[in-house]
């Protein structure tokens, strides 16, 4: 390995320890948590909206970069169901406010009114939240669901939800 690669690797390794030490909301991301959320899927399609209720389990961060794995389930009032796995990362906006971004995939059952074209659906989104002194959070989230052209039919859809996250 030449000297430039060694120095570059050393810089990246040092940066990873700095990022780990300064990761925002460490008290929350180092713990298990459960989020309960409600809202709408197909939120921006005026003709077909579905109320949703969901539950998500968030594991403690597993990397020095603060990535948080999660598994979840949502159910709509029209019978659509989505079971998923995703990865999350949190950015600090202020002492109590944060932005969480996520991406993942899951299995989607269309239900009565929502046909997304495939069983496998990818999910990406964000959550703006307020973290209380006890590390519980209240957040507003938006997500996009798409099969990423796994089938010819790929209408995609969005959800808007309000969630409460409890750490333990």
Image (cartoon, rainbow, N blue to C red):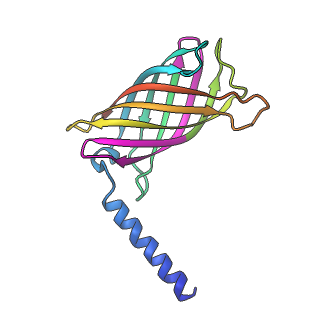
Residue 92 percent across, percent down from the top left: 33, 48
Q: Give coordinates of residue 10: x percent, y percent.
A: 45, 77
Q: Nearer the viewer, residue 71 or 49?
A: 49
Question: Is residue 40 in sight in this rendering?
Answer: yes
The percent coordinates of residue 17 (x first, y second) are 37, 66
What type of secondary structure mainly makes up the magenta span? strand
Q: Quadrant of the N terminus?
A: bottom right
Residue at horizontal 30%, vertical 44%? 28
Q: Does the segment drawn in magenta span residue 101? A: yes
Q: Image height check: is 90 above or below 11? A: above
- Name the quadrant of the C terminus: top left
- Chain part drawn in magenta: 75-103
Residue depicted at 31% across the width and 59% down the height? 22
Which residue is painted at 47% across and 25% down in the image? 160
Is 36 within the magenta? Answer: no
The residue positioned farthest toward the right in the image shown? 152
Visible residue check, residue 168: no
């Amino acid at each position: 390995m030449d000297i430039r690669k060694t120095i570059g690797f050393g810089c990246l390794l040092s940066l990873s320890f700095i990022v780990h030490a300064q990761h925002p909301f460490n008290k929350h991301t180092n713990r298990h948590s459960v989020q309960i959320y409600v809202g709408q899927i197909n939120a921006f399609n005026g003709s077909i909206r579905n109320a949703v209720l969901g539950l998500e389990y968030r594991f403690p961060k597993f990397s020095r970069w603060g990535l948080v794995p999660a598994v979840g389930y949502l159910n709509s009032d029209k019978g659509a169901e989505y079971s998923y796995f995703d990865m999350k990362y949190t950015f600090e906006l202020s002492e109590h406010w944060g932005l969480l971004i996520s991406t993942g995939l899951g299995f989607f059952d269309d239900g009565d009114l929502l046909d997304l074209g495939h069983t496998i659906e990818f999910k990406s989104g964000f959550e703006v939240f307020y973290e209380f002194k006890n590390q519980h959070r209240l957040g507003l989230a938006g997500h996009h669901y798409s099969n990423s052209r796994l089938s010819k039919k790929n209408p995609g859809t969005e959800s808007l939800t309000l969630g409460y996250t409890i750490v333990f």
